[in-house]
Image (tube, rainbow, N blue to C red):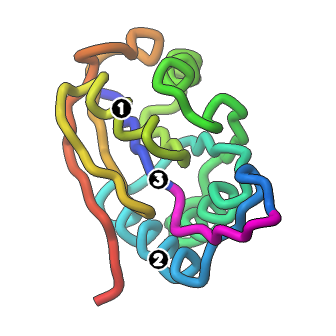
Amino acid sequence: MRRLVLLRHAKSEWPGDVPDHDRPLADRGRREAPLAGRWLAEHVGTIDLVMCSPAQRARETCALVTAELPTAPEVRVAPLLYPGYPADLVAVAQELPDTANTVLFIGHNPGLEDLVEDLSGSDCVLKTSSIAVLRGDGEWFDVGPGWAILEAAATPRPA
């Protein structure tokens, strides 16, 4: 069994003079990203590998999320996760190492929502800091349409 966990980056700022790739997290994003990390720790457990978009907001989300995990996973920056076209996300998944059973992608919409639908046939709205957990029975190189089921989805928010 493989689990592909998708996390949309936390809420970002929209400064007018900063390129999209370099937008940082907003205060709200810095508050909510650790909540996503805690949800992952409680509901997913050990994450073997994190594949993170190179965008600033995704890298900041990654740091805040992984700080909440019980075991620090290996983190790799994956250029194809930005902007995150579904075909590129599938290509990254198909190249994942066999030793990784649970992998977290930290990326962007609409690509992540499209990937959930492509792989599982399920609709899933991924707001900022939202998580989708996909479970597939095949190998990573088999990732494609119908490979997975949507096991869980959540948008952790402050109480």
Residue 8: give its label: 3
Please give the range of residues in magenta: 9-17
> Farthest front residue?
16
Would you say the magenta stretch is mainly helix, strand or loop? loop
Sequence-first tag of 2 and 3: 3
The residue at 71%/67% (across/down) is 24
In the displayed structure, 117 sits above or below 50; it is: above
Would you call the spot at circle 3 few (<14 residues within 10 Å), some (14-19), or many (20 or more)?
A: many
Q: Where is residue 125 in the image (x, y as percent from the top left)?
A: 27, 50
In the displayed structure, 61 sits above or below 50; it is: below
What type is the residue that disc 2 sits on?
Glu
The span from disc 1 to disc 2 (Cα, nearest Å) is 23 Å
Give the SS element for disc 3: strand
Q: Where is residue 135 in the image (x, y as percent from the top left)?
A: 27, 33
The residue at 63%/55% (across/down) is 58
Sequence-first tag of 3 and 1: 3
Q: Position of residue 37 (x, y in %)?
A: 46, 67
Give the SS element for disc 1: helix
What type is the residue that disc 3 sits on?
Arg
Q: In which quarter of the image is the C terminus?
A: bottom left
Q: Where is residue 95 in the image (x, y as percent from the top left)?
A: 58, 17
